[in-house]
Amino acid sequence: MNSGNLRHRVSILRATTAADSFGYPVETWSSIAEVWGEFREERATEVLKSERPTAFSQAILFLRYRADITAKDKVQCKGKTWDILNVRTLENMRRNEGLELALRTSD
């Protein structure tokens, strides 16, 4: 992984549960890390969902290796919040070099 390509500032978000003023649980997203990554927006598609057109964008994000990122987390980059579809570890010479995240967002 070429560190010169890691030029986008990315926030990793994780869901936490907190209680509202009435004591009911509310899911909130908080930032667990601010990292540099290589962001590549791949394509945008439009599908019918419940008889309404819905647009989706897909992207790939390359990061330095972190063991704490899972598909349950989210990524915030370029003013959008992205769902993580897949986390793949990139290995070089039997050591973990980085992560490749497949992302998707609804516009």
Image: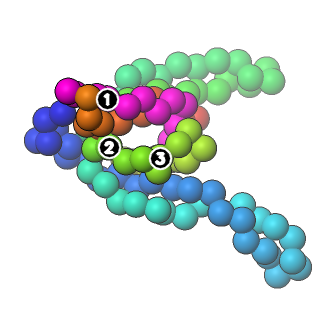
- The amino acid beneath tag 3 is Ile
- The amino acid beneath tag 2 is Tyr
* Above or below, 8 relative to 21: above
* Above or below, 52 relative to 1: above
Q: Which residue is mark 1?
A: 90
**Disc number placed over residue 7 in the picture, else none:** none
The tag earlier along the polypeptide, 2 or 1, is 2
| Residue 96 seen in the figure | yes
User: Viewed as shown, does residue 106 lie left or right of 78?
Assistant: right
- Name the residue: 53% across, 47% down: 74
**Disc number placed over residue 65 in the picture, else none:** 2
**SS at mark 3 in the image:** loop
**Disc number placed over residue 69 in the picture, else none:** 3
**SS at mark 2 in the image:** loop
- Name the residue: 46% across, 62% down: 32
- The amino acid beneath tag 1 is Leu
Query: Do the residues bearing badges 2 and 1 touch, measured as CB atoms within 8 Å?
Result: yes
User: Viewed as shown, does residue 85 lie left or right of 53?
Assistant: left
Could you tell me how far apart the alpha carbons at marks 3 and 2 are, in whole angstroms? 9 Å
- Quarter of the picture containing the N terminus is top left
Prevailing SS of the magenta stretch: strand
Could you tell me how far apart the alpha carbons at marks 1 and 3 are, in whole angstroms? 14 Å
Specify the segment rendered in magenta.
Answer: 82-93
Label 2: how many Cα within 10 Å (few below 14, some 14–19, many 20+): some
Task: Give yes or no for residue 19 being in the magenta stretch.
Answer: no
